[in-house]
Image (cartoon, grey):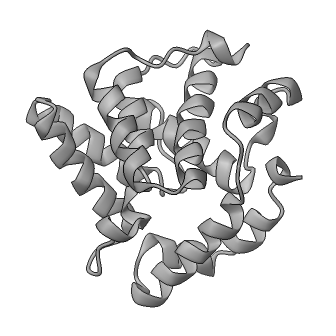
Amino acid sequence: MKLDDLVIPDTAACATAREVASAYCSPALLNHSARAYLWAAAYGTSQGIAFDAELLYVAAMFHDIGLVREFDSHTVAFDEAGGHVAWVFAAGAGWPAARRTRLAEVIVRHMWDQVDVADDPEGHLLERSTSLDISGRNVDDFTAAFRGEVLARHPRLGLGDEFVSCFREQAQRKPDSSAAAAMRNGIAARIAANPLDA
């Protein structure tokens, strides 16, 4: 598989989601969001998993938006906050209510340990791709050549340190959140050992 074989849907929602993410995310977080889609789409394609590419792309662009200062909620976890932001975005994009709810579900579920592909293919793919990009889980899903191609186009730019800092701060303020659970479960060590940063 080549990177250029993967298609980003040519829809207004995808273009605008990228515009919003570019306006609010750091360069490292924006590149992470782009890679999250690419790893997910590549894995889904290679495994024959049927998925809604527009839904997956918009979810990838917004899955960490709750970590940025402007959308950081002091009452809910960053993944839940991101789901709410995405729901509002999708309403503005004219998506029907059921599709907005699916978008929010995919974003929240990316922090689950596992998402059943039969129940939620987009949630499964985003959970798997973000785990790969943040901590290197299932890195062997892709050849070294493909990984190199993705990283050359969307470099990591110190994502690991930025992400640990974000999660540590989230965990301190919201001890019952998904970020706090991840910190308790050793995500900082896994990020430090991510082979994508080697």
Number of marks: 0
Q: Nearer the viewer, residue 151 or 119?
A: 151
18 vs 138, left or right, is: left
Where 177 falls versus 149 (above or below)? below
Residue depicted at 40% across the width and 46% down the height: 21
- Residue 189 is situated, as x and y percent measured from the top left of the image, at 77, 72
- Residue 195 is situated, as x and y percent measured from the top left of the image, at 85, 51
118 vs 42, left or right, is: left
Q: Quadrant of residue 163?
A: bottom right
Q: Quadrant of the N terminus?
A: top right
Q: Nearer the viewer, residue 103 or 153?
A: 153
Residue depicted at 82% across the width and 36% down the height: 140
Where 143 falls versus 131 (above or below)? above
- Residue 43 is situated, as x and y percent measured from the top left of the image, at 63, 26
- Farthest front residue in view: 23
Q: Nearer the viewer, residue 116 or 161?
A: 161
**One can see residue 52 in this view:** no
Where 150 falls versus 188 (above or below)? above
- Residue 183 is situated, as x and y percent measured from the top left of the image, at 60, 77
Residue depicted at 66% across the width and 59% down the height: 159
Where 43 falls versus 138 (above or below)? above
**One can see residue 105 in this view:** yes
Residue depicted at 46% across the width and 16% down the height: 50
